[in-house]
Amino acid sequence: MNEVTLRTERVSKRFGGLVAVSDFSLEVYKGEILGILGPNGAGKTTLFNVLSGFFRPTEGKVFYRDREITNLTSDRVATLGIVRTYQIVRLFDKLTVYENLLIPCLSPRISMKLPSKNRRDEHIFAVASEVGIESYLDELTVNLSHGVRKLVEFARALVSDPEVLLLDEPFSGLNPLEVEPLAEVITRFHDKGKTIVIIEHKLREFMKLVQRVVAMDRGKLIAQGSVKEISEDPFVIEAYLGKGASRFVNS
């Protein structure tokens, strides 16, 4: 039986009269790449914000390895090993790439493992080399291309040595030549036994990476299953293409 690493129980998140996530139950299995699929406004990023501690759910509970983390702050969630990236890259642009990667090393999770500067520097260089950005370590991030900035953000997440990595549209704004290197790094990270949850609108790249898919629309779970099952599901097709579209797609 697959081990559940991260799960929600009937989570809802409301902003005034707007229901962004509604009665949503999710299970993420250890070591899988789970894709969360849905049109704009489906509630995917709000769900990520709940999972990572940036938002507290209005209702429901969040668990990590059978420990309830519903009310933990984002820094405490990250210390446990749940780390996320953002659709819009968020780097410290007045700092170098090295300094951006150093910041997570000062957290309790890493500083206890790597107490000395030399060990932290070795760790940073190893991660930067794996991602392919070691030549940029002394560069200010503000001077980097969008593609390299995406790699830096991914490396910053990896420096935290996460058990669960939440990727919010990692390929957003990348051209095909930039997508492939990042996809390869994500795959290598997964091959080490890590758990990944990914949101992505570039469906071709998304479907190549994920092993299982959960589909959302208007804050609700509408389908889940294999890539093939989801790509043929009439509710998912209608969520993306409009009501009645499944009749034409499957005809």
Image (spheres, rainbow, N blue to C red):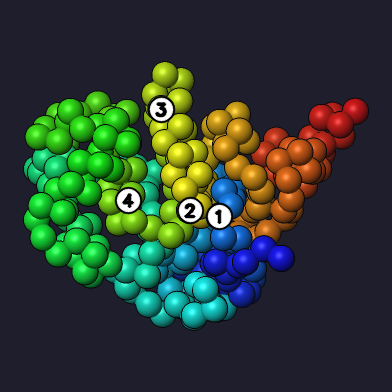
Which residue bears the numbered disc 3?
A: 181
Left or right of 179? Residue 240 is right
Query: Which residue is at 11% across, 32% downward?
Result: 139
Measured in 3D between alpha carbons, the distance from the residue under mark 4 to the one under mark 3, in whole angstroms, is 16 Å
Which residue bears the numbered disc 4?
A: 157
Q: What residue type is labelled 2?
A: Lys
Query: Which residue is at 70% across, 35% downward?
Result: 241
Q: Nearer the viewer, mark 2 or mark 3?
A: 2
In primary-sequence order, the first of circles 2 and 3 is: 3
* Rendered position, 37 above or below 54: above
In primary-sequence order, the first of circles 3 and 1 is: 1
Residue 71 visible in the displayed image: yes
Residue 195 x/y as whole percent: 51, 54
- Is 102 in front, or is 12? 102
Mark 3: secondary structure: helix
Is the C-beta separation of discs 1 and 2 under 8 Å? yes
- Is 246 in front, or is 103? 103
Q: Which of marks 2 and 4 is in front?
A: 2
In primary-sequence order, the first of circles 1 and 2 is: 1
Which residue bears the numbered disc 2?
A: 194
Residue 228 x/y as whole percent: 76, 38
Which residue bears the numbered disc 1?
A: 31
